[in-house]
Amino acid sequence: MKMAALCSEFGDLVQIKKQLISAISLCKDRGLLHSTKWASELAFALDPLPKDELPPAAPFTEEDAQDLDAFTLAKAYFDLKEYDRAAYFLKGCCSQKAYFLYMYSRYLSGEKKKDDETVDSLGPLEKGQVRNEALRELRVELSKKHTAGELDGFTLYLYGVVLRKLDLLKEAVDVFVEAIHALPLHWGAWLELSNLVTNIEMLKSLSLPDCWIKDFFMAHMYTELQMIKEALQKYQNLIEAGFSKSTYIISQIAVAYHNIRDIDQALALFNELRDQDPYRIDNMDTFSNLLYVKSMKPELSYLAHNLVEIDKYRVETCCVIGNYYSLRSQHEKAALYFQRALKLNPRCLGAWTLMGHEYMEMKNTSAAIQAYRHAIEVNKRDYRAWYGLGQTYEILKMPFYCLYYYRKAHQLRPNDSRMLVALGESYEKLSQQVEAKKCYWRAYSVGDVEKMALLKLAKLHEQLNESDDAAQCYMLYIQDIFSCGEQLEHAEVSTALRYLGQYYFKNKLYDEASLCAQRCCDYNDAREEGKALLRQISQVRDQSETPSADLFAPLSNNNTPVRRVSPVNLISFTP
């Protein structure tokens, strides 16, 4: 059945449901389980069709009839993961369906042998040269058929997978695009293509079919490329178009909020997802990351126990247990579970990254570097792995390496203040102060998550004897901290008050200096200096002072001076 012709205007939900039912049948026959699952979940979110509206079965050709017995037998073996046996009985079959299953069985047989050999002979961090031996033969055969124009949408997809596995990425992209045009409703082909798209320019350059499923692909790509605002808008449009019951869309929105660190929103969506689909394991590793960040130990423990009851040998379950042990500071146990996840799926991006974090905690930098590098091999868009490598080389005191990896992380997350602060620190270590200032100011401008950018900028100005600029940054820093109500928890407030007290004293602004000194007395580490400054001020009180009563009103109300210290110009440091 030519599905390209079936693509309808977005909004005709009956037509979309029919297309999904047809796609489910076609993917199921070919053993494409993940695509079958995706289409089934989406179809379930739409209203049921009456009997007379159900789509007809796919056309049954003369070749299909000839191959029926061999195909039925081979499919039974295939479903039991006896791939070589399935391929043996399909050899010589002529129908497109049987040919796909024949080639797919050979491919999966090679993958299984490769994975078995990797687990048997290599530690999880060793860079093995174990390859799927079937790939080259498959490429030769599929290439001949491709040149002759004999590949359908499914075999084009398989050809693309083979090319990707052989690192022929440009050719793979072209073949996946061709596969999508031939069979737009095969989600697996869209997903494979998404793994090869590296930036928004490449995405825009792709010639994609004008089909409703393209909206799902674009939303997925926006999430992958950290264009979260656009992704959320796409998913909202899909919900309004009639997919409000789709658990897939809810999970994707939750992942998008996770990516922008809107933790509360993401947690609420994951809890909703658990209510709707309590046995779901997909994306639960991401849910556990959120629980980890919020230090929600009882909830993370409950999730881990629940997933073990459902399926203890799933990658996501192992990652959740790993996060649980990591939160309990049992890093060796955590690393063990991430290793188990990787034995189940060596291409599990999250497990490589999380294992890198555990090795960092255990001060095993060489193992951490290997783990992060594996994560980048799986997905070059994983900013956490680039950032992790930067941190590792920072421990090793190799700032040039740090700079390279932090830059990569920053390119992937341009508005993440953590990347900018890390970049600034690297520039500072390399004595590139101007660049460091730009990074710190930019980190403050985009919304400093950790409230450290202004402090670092102030200290840098202080080192460079740029006292006016340092004072301005310290004032903004205190104002920022006080506005969050965190001033008592934040140890560095006393540092800022100490500096400002001395700065005002030197500039003969004794009222300001006095207030800063009094505030210093609220902090143990600055109390003595505050008292000493108050004594100094009292000694010179008879000298001329600059009155500025209105300046201190905010300070006495748990705020900071809002007037700019002159001369100060931070605009020059804005990139």
Image (cartoon, rainbow, N blue to C red):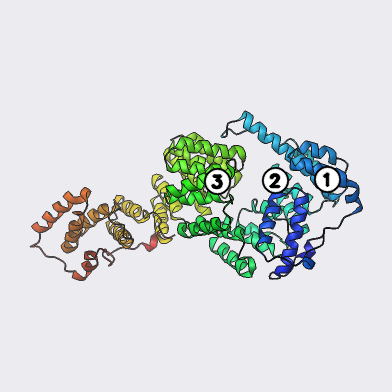
Q: Judge the density around disc 1: few (<14), some (14-19), many (≥20) Cα neighbours within 10 Å.
A: some
Quarter of the image where the C terminus is located: bottom left
**CA distance for labels 1 and 2:** 30 Å
Q: Which residue is drawn at the image coordinates 41% and 45% (left, top)?
A: 430
Q: What residue type is disc 2 on?
A: Arg
Q: Judge the density around disc 3: few (<14), some (14-19), many (≥20) Cα neighbours within 10 Å.
A: many
Q: Which residue is mark 3?
A: 307
Q: Is residue 507 visible?
A: no
Q: Which residue is mark 2?
A: 164
Q: Secondary structure at mark 1?
A: helix
Q: What residue type is disc 1 on?
A: Thr
Q: Which residue is mark 1?
A: 72
Q: Nearer the viewer, mark 2 or mark 3?
A: 3
- Please state the horizontal and vertical placement of residue 300, each as a whole percent of the image: 47, 48
Q: Nearer the viewer, mark 1 or mark 2?
A: 1
Q: Secondary structure at mark 3?
A: helix
Closer to the chain start, of discs 3 and 1, is 1
Q: Judge the density around disc 2: few (<14), some (14-19), many (≥20) Cα neighbours within 10 Å.
A: many
Q: Is residue 303 visible?
A: yes
Rendered position, 387 above or below 205: above
Q: Secondary structure at mark 2?
A: helix
Closer to the chain start, of discs 2 and 3, is 2
Q: Nearer the viewer, residue 273 or 433?
A: 273
Closer to the chain start, of discs 1 and 2, is 1
- Please state the horizontal and vertical placement of residue 502, each as a whole percent of the image: 20, 55
Relative to 361, is 68 on the left or the right?
right
